[in-house]
Image: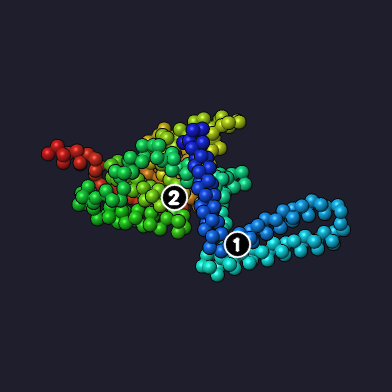
Amino acid sequence: MPLTNQQYNAIMRGYDRRQYQNYRLQCARQDEIYKKIPRIRSLDEHISSCSLAHAEQLISLQDAEPEHDRREILTGLKERLDALRQEKEALLLESGYPADYLDMHYTCPDCRDTGYVGGRKCRCFHKEEIRLLYSSSRLESVLSRENFSTLSCEVYDEEQKAHMLSVIHLCHDFADTFGDGRKSLLFYGPVGTGKTFLSNCIAKELLDRGYSVIYFTAFQFFEQFSFSGNSGPGSQEPARHEALLQSDLLILDDIGTELANTFTVSKLFQVLNERALAERSTIISTNLSPRDFRDIYSERVFSRITSTYTLVKFAGSDIRIRKKISRSL
């Protein structure tokens, strides 16, 4: 799950390219404006020299003048700078340009295209991290086959169809309104009734809209914690934990197929609880009935799920077996 050094370096090179591209675009805008409005070039030169004078004054006046005189001199310099900038903005507006046309336009204003805010990974870094992991995994090819555009109600038998149409509508609504208040789903029902397929449909929809999605089978999910004892320098445990909590959507597929014990139960509760507190969405799919789920994972886990999740029942016969039978006829 965590990035390799090669993947991390690839993301950081992407930020370097982004910074260079935005710098080149800023230079192109500047050349355009200098040709159309020559006065702005002169103003920029004045602003540059005035800013330098401001910095030099700050240094030279530290001990040389009384506090009152220093404030008066620096206030005068600041007023001159403000006047020059206001004139520049007015010229841009008069010529039909936005006031910030010559500023650096960052792809991500939060981190200014560095990937980090206050020493922590920016939200855009997390999205790029998930995108890279998604594109390098088998999930990309799976989602090209399993999505809303390839979904057909003909795979369901007549008894299933009416119920599953309402389930599909709910899944569409979940994806369409994602971001309008965090929601979570628990898919439960027999094997082969479409739980994984519809989870993938939602994942594809959200990934295409720029949301970060992490998908794990039960085995893969609990395997993330198998090296949790190694939390020293260079450990990937913090990054692993952060990714589990920060993704816009976490999908846990086939929960209940792993060997449940006190360790897996406590880890499941920890992740679900922290994601709920952080208002992050989760989809859990299981072949267990709600009662069996409660008995295996404890009342505490089940209570957390029932208080914040929509429970969605899948019913009917195994679609995969029925497809094989129909092809053999």
Work out whether residue 21 or residue 169 is closer to the camera in this orientation and state it. 21
Q: Which colour scheme is used?
A: rainbow
Residue 184, image x, y percentages: 43, 51
Q: Which amino acid does label 2 sit on?
A: Tyr
Residue at horizontal 76%, vertical 64%? Answer: 76
Decide which of 101, 160 is in the foreground and name it: 101
Specify the farthest residue to the bottom. Answer: 94
Q: Name the residue under label 2.
A: 211
Q: Is mark 1 on a helix, strand or loop?
A: helix
Q: Residue 146 carries which label?
A: none
- Image vertical order of residue 245 relative to residue 3, above or below: below
Seen in the image, is 73 located left or right of residue 299?
A: right
Q: Which amino acid does label 1 sit on?
A: Ile
Expressed as whole percent of the image width and height from the top left, the position of residue 267 reads 50, 38
Q: Where in the figure is residue 261, as x and y percent of width and height?
A: 46, 34
Kindly identify which residue carries mark 1. Answer: 40
Residue 171 seen by the camera: yes
Residue pictured at 16% horizontal, 39% vertical:
327
In the rendered structure, which disc, 1 or 2, sits on the residue that comes first in sequence?
Answer: 1
